[in-house]
Amino acid sequence: MRGDQPGPGTSDDTLFGLSALHQGPPQVPGRGDLDFSRAVLDQLYSYRPKREGIAYPLWLLTGIFGGHRFYLDRPGTGLLMLLTVGGAGLWWLVDVLLIPRMVRKFNEDQARRRFLGLPPRQLAFMPAKGETLPPEPHWAAKRGTRVRLVADSVVMMLAGGSLGTFARGFGVYEPIIAVLALIAITLLGTRWAALSNLPILRGFDRWAHRLRLFYYTNDPGGAVSLAFRQVLAAFAILRRRRRAEARLYLQFGVWFTIIFTVFDIIEAASGTGGFTTSLVRDFYMTLFATYAFAAPIGAILNKHVLLQRSDRVIWVLSGVAVLFIATSLF
C-alpha cells in the first residue's frame, strides 16, 4: 500500500482506531493499488473553517443569489435566495448582520466533529476515519453485472461522441486533452507507483485517489444517471454527496482550465493572438465541458477499477471513449 508511514512514536491505532479506514479493502494481486492511505485521508478529511473575509465579498458580489449561503453550507436557504432574488433584496440586506453568526456556527460544528472523530461537515455522509472499509463496495453486487457493463460501455460512447461533437462545433479542443489526461491518470494511478513521486503529477495522482475513495463509499450510480450527471447536478445541489462529487470534478476542471488559459495568455502576449472576448469565452466553455464530460467518464472508470475488473475491461472502456471522441471530430 502506498502512502505516508506513521512518524516515530505514532501508530495508526492511535490515529484512526484499531481498524483504520486507510488500511483499505483487500487487494487483488495484479489489479492495482487503490491507495486509501493516511496521506489521502488527511487531504480529503480536512476540517476547513469558514471565514468572514470570504463570506462578506461573496455576500456583496453574489449574495442576492445566495452565494454566501452556499459557501456557508446552507444550500436550502441559498436556493430560496436564488429563486426570490434575495427576497427582493431585503433578505440580502438582513444577511449582512447574520454572517458573523453563520460563520461562527459552522466553525463550532466543524470543531465538534473534529473532536468527536466524525467526518467534516461537507463529508457528513462519509465514514469516520476510525471505521474499516468493507471488503468490497456496498454497491458492488448491484453494479457489477454484465448488463451494467454493457450499459456503461454505451455511456462511454455517448460521452466520448458528445465531447468530440462539442469540441468540433465550438472550436474548443482543450476539454479533450483534459479528459484524456483523466483517463491516463485513472489507468496509471493504480498501476504505476512512481506517478505519486513526480512533480505536478503527484497532485493529480492524489486527487484521483480521493475520487476513488469517494466512490468506494458512495454508489457512482447507474448508466442513466451517469449519462446525464452534468444535467442532474443542477438539481442535486441540496445533496451533500452530490456537491462533494461535483467539487472534486470542478477542482480537476479548474486546474486544467487555468493551465490552458495561461498558455492562451502567453500566446496573446507574444503577438500571435489578442486579448479578446474569445479568451473569456474559451475559459468558461473549457471549464464547463471538462466538468460535464469528465464526470461520467471518470465515474465509470473508477467504478470498474473499484470492482477490480481485469485490465482488459478497463482499457477497453477507455478505448471506447477515445474512439468515439476521435470519430466525432471528423
Image (spheres, rainbow, N blue to C red):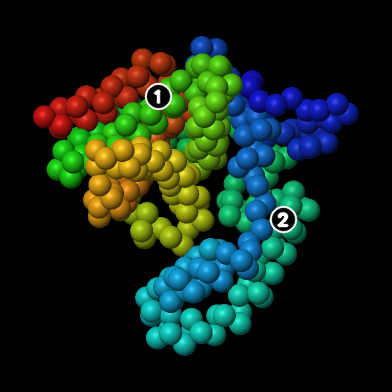
Report the residue at 63% width, 61% height from top: 50
Quarter occupied by residue 73: bottom right
The amino acid sitting under disc 1 is Ala
Mark toward the viewer: 1 or 2: 1
Q: Which residue is mark 1?
A: 184
Quarter occupied by residue 236: bottom left
Report the residue at 46% width, 52% height from top: 242
> Is 229 above or below relative to 215?
below
Helix, strand or loop for disc 1: helix
> Is 127 above or below relative to 145?
below
Residue 74 place in picture, x, y as percent: 54, 68
- Which residue extends farthest top? 30
Residue 49 place in picture, x, y as percent: 66, 58
The amino acid sitting under disc 2 is Arg
Query: Does any portion of residue 127 appear in the rendered image?
Result: no
> Is 326 above or below relative to 274?
above
> Is 64 above or below relative to 330?
below
In the displayed structure, does residue 276 sit left or right of residue 77? left
In the displayed structure, does residue 20 sit left or right of residue 152? right
Q: Going from the N terminus, do you reach mark 1 or mark 2 first?
A: 2
- Which residue extends farthest front? 271
Q: Dots 1 and 2: beta carbons under 8 Å?
A: no
Residue sitting nearer the eye, 224 or 100: 100
**Quarter of the image that includes the C terminus:** top left
Residue sitting nearer the eye, 102 or 242: 102
**Quarter of the image that includes the N terminus:** top right
Local crowd at mark 2 within 10 Å, few (<14), some, or many (≥20)?
A: some
Residue 41 place in picture, x, y as percent: 64, 37
Report the residue at 83% width, 36% height from top: 14
Q: Which residue is mark 2?
A: 113
